[in-house]
Amino acid sequence: MANLIKLKIEAFTDAKCTSSTGKSITAVINPESYSLNYGVKYEASKEKLNNANTQIFTGMNASSLDLDLVVDGTGIIPLPGFSDVDSYINELKSIVYNYQGSYHRPNYLKITWGDKLKYTCVCESISMKYTLFKPDGTALRATVKLKFKENIDFKTKLRMAQMSSPDLTHVRTVKAGDTLPLMTYRIYGDSSWYLEVARFNNLSHFSAIRPGDEIHFPPLKK
């Protein structure tokens, strides 16, 4: 019989999740399910006298993960390392949610469950629902609802952008609100190359773009 693998949440100080804080926590009871959510960002076209919208792609939303953890302190299920439901929840909250004064933000997180779930993220929200109590009001059972937002470090994002289209020239039409650094970031994953793009397009200044202009983004030697 295969050993039961518990869902695990680990805390890190860096976005790449390589510098561990040394703190982690496992599920008391593995979740019955979890939800992975993906989204795409669009904005409606703004041409005059339009009677229907054309949706213009503007980017990809970060994915999100929702899961519920049941914490049982009745003794039916072992609660190793914790005296009661509240002590488990306090430790979970300190790992996934609490502000860390040494580096001025909550922890970065890695969630793993065997080989099926590996997710680097930050906690977006945590809420607790208590459903069973001792006569003195001490909680005996709770469900913790957790919402996580995917987090990818900058170097990995840049590498992904380079892998997707390293040798292609892209042509983009300037839209209202666009700047050359912003458009450069969308293509290369790094806005610092906007001056090279300006020179390639013979722009007198990097801000000399207007809605409707076509800008060419050439392959750049990294």
Image (tube, rainbow, N blue to C red):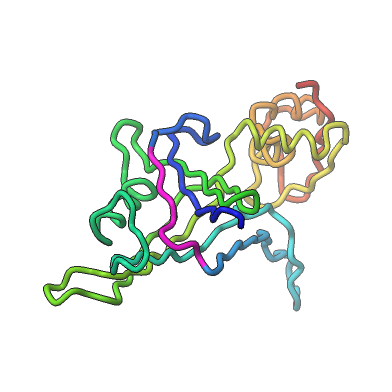
**Residue 29 highlighted magenta (yes or no):** yes
- The one nearer the camera, 15 or 56, is 15
Residue at 73% over, 68% down: 48
- The one nearer the camera, 76 or 18, is 76
Number of numbered callouts drawn: 0
Residue at 37% over, 69% down: 143
Write the start and end of the magenta stretch as one range: 23-31
Horizontal side, residue 116 vs residue 68: left or right: right
Horizontal side, residue 24 vs residue 162: left or right: left
**Residue 144 highlighted magenta (yes or no):** no
Against 147, is 81 above or below? above
Q: Residue furthest right?
A: 168
Q: Quadrant of residue 29?
A: bottom left
Q: Quadrant of the C terminus?
A: top right
Q: Position of residue 178 (x, y in %)?
A: 65, 46
Q: Position of residue 22 (x, y in %)?
A: 39, 34
Against 43, is 156 above or below? above
